[in-house]
Amino acid sequence: MTAITIEGVTKNFGPVHVLKGIDLAIEPGEFVVLIGPSGCGKSTLLRMIAGLDDLTAGNIYIGGRRVNDLAPKDRDIAMVFQSYALYPHMTVKDNMSFSLKLKRTPSEAIGRAVGNAANLLGLNALIGRKPRELSGGQRQRVAMGRAIVRKPKAFLFDEPLSNLDARLREQMRFEIRKLHRDLGATSVYVTHDQIEAMTMADRIVAMNGGIVQQVGSPLDLYDNPANLFVAGFIGAPAMNVLAADCAQSGAGTELRIGASKLVTVDRTLDVARVSLGIRPERVRLASADDGVPAEVVLVEPTGLATVAHVTVGGQLLNLFTTERPRITAGETVYIRVAPEDVRLFDPETGARI
Amino acid sequence: MFGSKTRRRLLSIAHYVAIAAYVVAALFPLFWLLKVSVTPNSLLYSEGVRLWPSSITWDHYNSVIHHTDFPLFFVNSTIVSGVTAALTTLFAAGAGYAFSRFVFRGKVWLVGLMLVTQMFPLVMVIAPIFKLFAPLGLTNSLTGLIVIYTAYNIPFAAFLMQSFFDGIPRELEEAAMIDGATRLGAVRQIVLPLTLPGIAATLGFTFTAAWSELLFALMLNSKQEATTFPVGLLTFVSKFSVDFGQMMAAGVLALLPVCVFFFLIQRHLVTGLTAGAVKG
Ligand SMILES: Nc1ncnc2c1ncn2[C@@H]1O[C@H](COP(=O)(O)OP(=O)(O)O)[C@@H](O)[C@H]1O
Ligand SMILES: [Mg+2]
């Protein structure tokens, strides 16, 4: 049995169609990340799972039970908000025990649960403070603590790390994953940050314009994006997308960027132009006799790797290498692309071909 | 030519001077009230304009308390203002919460209608109100005053409360509802404690409004036992003279409950008024 099933869910706010038919099945214990640009309806979907917004159409099941008309309090889920939504007039301890008190849990049991959560999250020293006396990172932990003391059926996270600085975000990413491993609870995590999605998810659900674009494991989406949206959204630096002309060449098709023959793929294409996608790390430096010429525009060394921005046939392209090539802006280099690394998309619809 | 530090200091001095000037100007009439209330009648006109009389007396207070109906007016006013403040705040909190949190049909019209009630002068509605109240037995009664004051204060109080509710993030209630509370429970345990400043401000505002209202109190009630304090003050003005001493003494006494009331709520009020101000 699935933990959460979303079936043909749509949502309109008046004339605005925010979600246009979402289907999704989340397995017990799975960590699913919803990713998409701001305004694509991620929070709306999460809020409907929580019961904070009504559905326009469709069904949501939690643990096999249809919950469309169930109040949030009866769904047995916990949610961590982007703003943390800690109760400002209560101490950390009271914030964390609020839900248990409402359930009339005996006070020793509450004490134990809060103590465990505080231990797990390193909140012991802060237990008597009010939220306004905490730093952003500490508030975030309290919000997590409030969620885990309940032992809910599922955790919902709405961009919980977006208010933290980069280093803290990295650390919390790790801790949330670790918590998930220890508690094993089904989690739905919303973010617009593809690094969070890639590093945390068992499965990623990429959304855009109120529609699910692709569902799959992080590397699935990275290696085999279903369309140009996913290709552009997942991975940093992003996948290069070039406008290429197709020319039949024996059993294959030659793909040209301007005057340069970049690569020949092993299949026939009955179109004149395609969008050619290639990951920056799959673009290799080559010698004059087995590569095509490229003009270097900019070189960005990060220490770990070097990103070079080059133009081929007038189109900009990124090249990512962990070697430290001695190239400088203005110079001409030669690049090579392997046919198996190339992903082709319909330039009109953006769909994979 | 000034360093920025000197300039900042000068600016802050100017600030204080301006505030002090305002406070003096605002409090001066109150001081005069106090001064006249303790000035013996014999000195009132004979000493010219002085900041403080050469001798003082408590006679005026004594006669106001023991020889007039003021204690009764006082009780009447306290009842009317207290009940009005409580009822208005209760209804205004409910309405303000609904305006802040729910989308419902006719909301715009309702808000518009409430604004309209605040637009024309009270004098215009006195005659129809009197016509309505007389057969209901609401003239010459404190209940009548409470009804009209409550009705008249609710619109503004509701908007005031709405601005306080708007200042409390919705997500707090949502978090509480996910944590297992009903909406009402979330309001009681999360929203209510956070909106205490707003409630204090609304109580204070309505209490003072009702305490100092003259027009309805004068027109609807003529019997002594339903007279409120502002109407009572007028009894010191007779055809031939004004008993300033007693009038001022009564005025000072009338300030007391308002002072006590504001003292009780002031801790909440300061944050309350600024919170409201920021939200506009
Ligand atoms: N209560 C609401 N009323 C009207 N429109 C809304 C409401 N909530 C969200 N929207 C709209 O729905 C769209 C999706 O919002 P949201 O789910 O918050 O996006 P995301 O979380 O993916 O950034 C946005 O265009 C937003 O303006
Ligand atoms: Mg969002």
Image (cartoon, coloured by chain):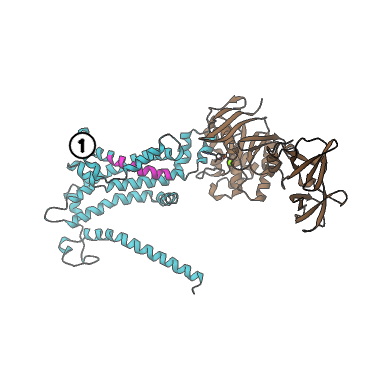
Q: Which residue is mark 1?
A: B131
Q: Is residue B254 magenta?
A: no
Q: Position of residue A178 (x, y in %)?
A: 69, 40
Q: Amino acid at mark 1?
A: Lys
Residue B179 visible from this viewpoint: no
Q: Magenta segment range?
A: B148-163
Q: Residue furthest left?
A: B240
Query: A336 or A32, which is in the foreground?
Result: A336
Q: Quadrant of ligand 1?
A: top right
Q: State the brown chain.
A: A
Colour in which chain B is drawn: cyan
Report which quarter residue A92 is drawn in: top right
Q: Position of residue B190 (x, y in %)?
A: 48, 40
Q: Majority secondary structure of the magenta segment?
A: helix
**What's the residue at 35%, 43% (across, down)?**
B115
Query: A118 or A162, which is in the foreground?
Result: A162
Q: Chain of mark 1?
A: B
